[in-house]
Image: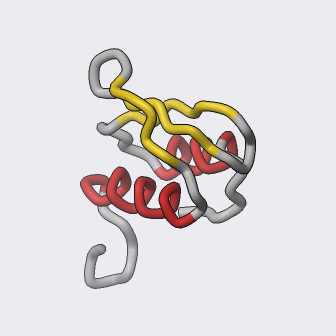
């Protein structure tokens, strides 16, 4: 996090991964290129997570697909 309390682009993946794990999601496997597949017990489906996620919008969409209401 920056001094202003906002996430930097470099921290988005780390924070996204932390939130997914907090909600019981599990890493399933490495997908194509810089993507990973995670299983969400909340939505009962796999979600694709880009290791190179660069925007809050994309990170929030992953959380939404996983059934997690928290926003970055």
Image quadrant containing the N terminus: bottom left
Colour pattern of the rendering: secondary structure
Residue 44 image offset from top left, x and y in percent: 72, 38
Q: Position of residue 9 (x, y in %)?
A: 31, 54
- Residue 8 lies left or right of residue 29; in this view the side is left
Q: Nearer the viewer, residue 27 or 64?
A: 27
Q: Position of residue 17 (x, y in %)?
A: 41, 54
Q: Position of residue 51 (x, y in %)?
A: 32, 38
Image quadrant in which you'd find residue 12: bottom left
Q: Is residue 52 left or right of residue 72?
A: left
Q: Relative to 22, is 46 above or below?
A: above
Q: How many numbered marks does the figure carry?
A: 0
On screen, residue 19 above or below 35: below
Name the residue: 57% across, 33% down.
47
Q: Residue at x 60, y 31 (%)?
A: 46
Please name whichever residue, 41 or 5, is drawn nearer the observer in this view of the structure. 41
What's the residue at 33%, 57% (across, down)? Answer: 14
Q: Which residue is found at the position 52% from the left and 55% from the top? A: 20
- Which residue is farthest top? 32
């Amino acid at each position: 996090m920056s001094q202003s309390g906002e996430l930097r682009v470099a921290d988005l993946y780390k924070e996204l991964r932390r939130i997914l794990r907090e909600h019981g999601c599990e890493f399933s496997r490495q997908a194509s290129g810089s993507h990973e597949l995670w299983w969400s017990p909340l939505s009962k489906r796999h979600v694709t997570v880009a290791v190179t996620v660069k925007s809050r919008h994309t990170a929030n969409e992953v959380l939404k697909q996983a059934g997690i209401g928290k926003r970055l």
